[in-house]
Amino acid sequence: MEDVKAYIETGILELYVLGEVTPAERLQVEEMAAKHPAVKAELDEIEQSMELYAEENAIEPSEHLRGRILGSLLTNFGDDNNFPSPTHVQHENVVPMTTPKKESSNFYKYAFAACLALLIGATVALINVYQRLQATDNQLSAMQLQTQRFSNTVSAKDDELSLLRDTSFKLIHLKGTAKSPNSVMTVAFSPTKQKVVIDMEGLKLPANDSTHQYQLWALVGGKPVDLGVFDATSDTSGFKNMKAIANADAFAVTLEPRGGSVSPTLSEMVVLGKY
């Protein structure tokens, strides 16, 4: 197959169509076309390209130019009666004029058509290759994004398992208040490590709007201590680290203006749980 491809790329098929090959080369082309469908298909495509180019680039002379040519021919025919007699002509030095062969003119025209066809074919091939590369690049980017998300998920799960295996943490289940009786939330608290973590995946609180956030409080000696704010949305997952604290008697969550408040709004308390 490589030999057939190399044979096609030699340009012998274009020369064959143009009639610029030797008898031996012509016989060779015809034998190759009979043996190899690829050669025959390429030969047919070259012939069609040249015929199409010749038809599309044919120029019809204008009526003005047609009239001038016909007038010139009639004038020349009229002047033939004034030409010297054959006897007179044989004593003059006449230099015959040669005109370029039509085949030579056609050669350049068909050669240009062949080059143009090859250029168009190469351009189309490059565009196809570029589009395939773009599609492959998009697929790779999507795969990299999925891999990164998977890696982040695995890392988060590892952190969750590490926390659950850590005996210094205690799970505190916060239950709903009269404000929101169906609300449920779990807080993991380690006094020795002074860490407070919210289980966001098990969070069951009404979704807050864009102007409000939930705020976690620790009750220490009857006084509320701010532990940070968080949002309750449908896509919450994993664990969320809150502000550090060394000890707490209980934990509570209130709905506050976005950014949190200095002190809790007791009327907006949604969950509460003792340590």
Image (cartoon, grey):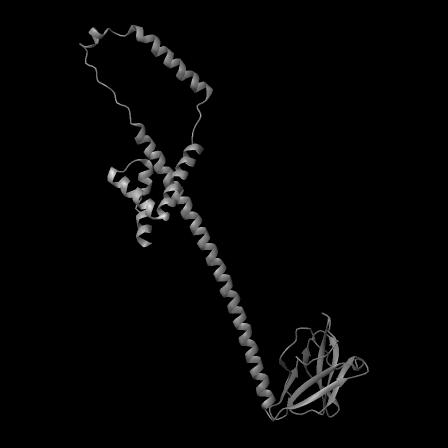
The answer to whether residue 270 is left or right of residue 197 is right
Residue 139 showing in the rendered view: yes
Q: 180 or 29: which is nearer to us?
A: 29
The answer to whether residue 48 is left or right of residue 184 is left
Residue 259 to residue 22: above or below: below
Residue placed farthest to the left in the image?
91
Residue 208 to residue 220: above or below: above
Task: Write down the quadrant of residue 175 in the picture.
Answer: bottom right
In the image, residue 266 lies at what x, y percent?
A: 79, 82
Residue 22 showing in the rendered view: no
Locate the C terminus and report the quarter of the image it occupies: bottom right
Q: Residue at x 39, y 41 (%)?
A: 44
In the image, residue 199 lies at what x, y percent?
A: 66, 82
Residue 64 to residue 251: above or below: above
In the image, residue 167 lies at what x, y percent?
A: 60, 93
Q: Residue at x 21, y 9 (%)?
A: 89
